[in-house]
Amino acid sequence: MSTFDKVAVDITVVLGTTTMPIHQVLRLGRGAIIELDSTEEDAVKILANNLPVAQGTVAVNGNRIAVHVEELLQRPPDMR
């Protein structure tokens, strides 16, 4: 096993955003639906450890949801 096999990376996919009052957030329960400011055709942001690394599109196959990576983003000069 290589050293990289032991490194954990937190991947986050940002589908969209919304704003709602805290009293609505506190009333959310299991199965609640939160409407976002994006559509299924919009690009999604892919973050690794909260840093943007790529953009992609949502792909639905049966009951599974995935993200198709369309573009890798350039790293900032201080991260190279």
Image: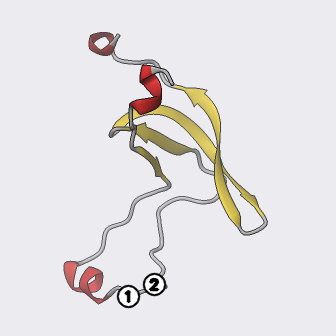
> Which is more toward the observer, 7 or 74?
7
Identify residue type, mark 2: Ala
**Amino acid on which the number 1 mark rests in the picture:** Gly
Asked whether 20 or 51 is in front, the reply is 51
Density class for disc 2 (Cα within 10 Å; few <14, some 14-19, many ≥20) is few
- Mark pair 2, 1: CA separation: 6 Å
Look at the numbered discs 2 and 1 and tell me whether their residues touch, using CB distance below 8 Å.
Answer: yes
Q: Residue at x 42, y 21 (%)?
A: 3
Which secondary structure lies at badge 1? Answer: loop
Q: Residue at x 40, y 34 (%)?
A: 52
Q: Is residue 11 left or right of residue 57?
A: left
Residue 29's tag is: 1
- From the top left corner, tell me how far across and down residue 37 is, in percent: 47, 62
The structure residue drawn at horizontal position 37% and vertical position 65%, both measured from the top left corner, is 18
Percent across and percent down for residue 21 are 24, 78
Residue on which the image places disc 2 = 32
Secondary structure of residue under mark 2: loop
Percent x, y of residue 53: 46, 30
| Vertical placement of residue 46 versus 76, above or below | below
